[in-house]
Image (cartoon, rainbow, N blue to C red):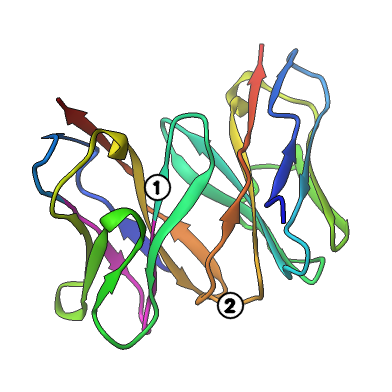
Amino acid sequence: DAGVIQSPRHEVTEMGQEVTLRCKPISGHNSLFWYRQTMMRGLELLIYFNNNVPIDDSGMPEDRFSAKMPNASFSTLKIQPSEPRDSAVYFCASSPRQGSNTEAFFGQGTRLTVV
Amino acid sequence: AQSVTQPDIHITVSEGASLELRCNYSYGATPYLFWYVQSPGQGLQLLLKYFSGDTLVQGIKGFEAEFKRSQSSFNLRKPSVHWSDAAEYFCAVGGNNDMRFGAGTRLTVKP
């Protein structure tokens, strides 16, 4: 398996524009996580899905952020409108099953810069 | 919700020296504990994990970690550090069906 695949690897956009980050989890994995990493706040869990259903989105910073998982092999994280403070590395991770005792497999991340 | 504290933001060790990275967790039930490593520009890679049983767990790349319930700790160790170990290390705790990470410890290895 190719692992968790994220696209794009880098994204530079202007403030106010819509940004969509994409993730393909490992085939057969039932749980999917979106994390944001910044120097100031470290690695923050934004939202996670189990069997394509959002389970906990309490980490989503505000209404400008939304995430979807239309099927088991694809998820998106959208920011609209984007702001400079959204600049960060966004990681997607997947896990074989729901549960706190399973490891997460991470993608290589999308580095987002909002100017 | 569970939480993790990594007290050391940055640690520098000489190549060949021993290493210990600290991790303290907070969780009301039995924790599931993980250590991940992140190289520059890369995602996180699992080093080792603790679910139950033997409190000393072995991982990849010669790392090990010891779970101490009485101290709520899960410190990562390596007897002899290699220059390629320079990276950021994250401790994580699983609970409530998700995973929470510490702030990370950046490891610098001196020649």
* Residue A43: % across, % down: 48, 45
Identify the amino acid type marked 1: Val
- Report the residue at 50% width, 77% height from top: A101
Q: Which mark is residue B37?
A: 1
The answer to whether residue A48 is left or right of residue A76 is left
Amino acid at pointer 2: Gly
Which segment did they paint magenta? Answer: B20-35
Quick check: is B9 in the magenta stretch?
A: no
The answer to whether mark 1 and mark 2 are in CB contact below 8 A is no
The residue that appears at 79% across and 18% down in the rendered structure is: A16
Residue drawn at point x = 10 percent, y = 48 percent? B18
Q: Quadrant of residue A32?
A: bottom right
How far from the left and from the top, in percent, is residue B60?
36, 59
Decide which of A114, B58 is in the foreground and name it.
B58
Q: Which residue is tagged 2?
A: A99
Q: Is residue A9 above or below residue A56?
A: above
Which of the labelled discs sits on residue B24, or is there none?
none
Secondary structure under tag 2 reads loop
Q: Is residue B23 magenta?
A: yes
Q: Residues within 10 Å of mark 2 (few under 14, many from 20)?
A: some
Front position among marks 1 and 2: 1
